[in-house]
Amino acid sequence: MSEGSPRILPIVHRGIVLIQDAPPGLSVRLDETPLPGDGSQRIITPPDTAFTLQGGPSKVCIRPGGWTGRITGQKGRLVTGVAADLADPAADVAVIAFSGARILAFATARAVEGGRFLLVLPEDAETGPRRVLHLGIVGSDHLLDDGTLAIGRAREGAAPRKPAHTGRTIRIKIACPNLKEAPAWGDYHFARSLQTSLERLGHRVMVDTHDAWYARREDEDVAIVLRGRARYKVQPDKINLLWLISHPDRLTPDEYADYDHVAVASDIYAATLRQNGVTNVGTLHQATDAALFRAELTLPRQKSCLFVGNSRREYRTMVRWCIQRGVPLDLYGGGWDGVIDPAMLRAPSIANADLPRFYASHQILLNDHWDSMRDHGFLSNRLFDGSATGTPIITDAIAGIAEVFGDTIPTAADIDTFAGLVEDALARPESWLERAAEARRIVHGAHTFDHRAATLSDLIERLS
């Protein structure tokens, strides 16, 4: 739904229904029965069984009872806790933080990790006016124990806050051969964004290309390895974290034991590793740099598709489909010589800093995955970056996408489905932009590098 349209908060506590951006005269219904009242609140007597609330395009389902959860700690913007669905203990639970009728942040409490969650509040939660926040479980009537927090600018004369974490020296290891080649490597930009977010938490962070992996081993408390083509030799007396963001086929089964923790950018593959006896594993999806891929970026959109990617010495599926069906396409990337008509190629590359502008100026962004990523549910970083700019995306069929993005990113497994989606997106751009705005909210709410840095920083504290 578009920003500014009414949204019912997906939690009901003590019979209070909260509606964000509620226009005057909004009709709110409980199981088709209109509720009396106006404004951002409605008072109801909740049924004993699951019920549905609807106001305008916003619709939520609430199940009363059968939930549990509590806050276990707070350090600045970071809130830790546990939450669970007692009726379905194997299910993950979504937790939200809200103030009044406005959602500020959300997190996932994963059942396989004991229901633990780490929620990252936005920066203005600390720097803005002091206010009261509540944390509760989505789709429930349950506020977490100790889930009411006061946060915001301290009163005049109050003592400053202590840093959230004790600073560590962290080295992020990437597969790029050297710094000269780094600007052309996606892992380098990924690592630099993570570096910036970790530094905001008080850590000292460096990015080591392959030629510098072992150059300063004495100046290192923590190694975060973005696994590439070569295996990293860990220092057993340091904290060693593996973040597997792609190509799981490159690892040998014994490699996981090298690390104190294995973070996997796929719920599906993390579950596979657990089934295979890897116990030190958790899910950590890819993310976006919110300072670069900004939510407020608005540009006129060309009525065409955008594909950014190298040919990989093959005829990329979505590019081939565009050509076969005459779909308007702006293509950027390298290695396309001899694969397509040279006149089709706009440029061999786009600088990383320019990607947001290109995404936000096209009606459709196309995305696909390596076979090993698609087979194992590793969601491409482009899904997070493109969604962060509010750009409609069409991607290849990949398992696990709905668990992260809901129904905001449609998938195509064949040319007919693809052509139908493109036709609809070009014919009904406003509908697609509304859906993309919801994907943008999802990404900026839970999938930025600030969120990932907070998770990793909390993990480092627990492993220390």
Image: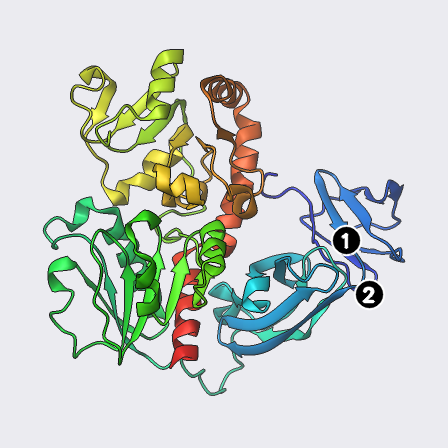
Picture residue at 52% right of the left edge, 54% below the top = 445
Residue 393 vertical position relative to residue 423 in the rendered view, above or below? below
Q: Nearer the viewer, residue 153 or 244?
A: 244
Identify the residue under disc 1: 62
- 270 lies left or right of 43: left
Identify the residue under disc 2: 14
* Residue 327 at x, y percent in the picture: 39, 16
Residue 429 vertical position relative to residue 37 in the rendered view, above or below? above
- 11 lies left or right of 341: right
- 241 lies left or right of 99: left
Q: Amino acid at mark 2?
A: Arg
Q: Nearer the viewer, residue 421 or 34?
A: 421
* Residue 206 at x, y percent in the picture: 22, 67
Tag 1 secondary structure: strand
* Residue 195 at x, y percent in the picture: 29, 63
**Can you say which quadrant of the picture contains the C terminus?**
bottom left
Residue 441 visible somewhere in the drawing: yes
Tag 2 secondary structure: loop
Residue 123 vertical position relative to residue 188 in the rendered view, above or below? below
Picture residue at 16% right of the left edge, 19% below the top = 338
Spatial CA distance of label 2 from label 1 is 13 Å
How many other residues sit within 10 Å of disc 2, few (<14), some (14-19) or many (≥20)? few
Q: Amino acid at mark 1?
A: Ile
**Can you say which quadrant of the picture contains the N terminus?**
top right
Residue 300 visible somewhere in the drawing: no
* Residue 274 at x, y percent in the picture: 48, 60
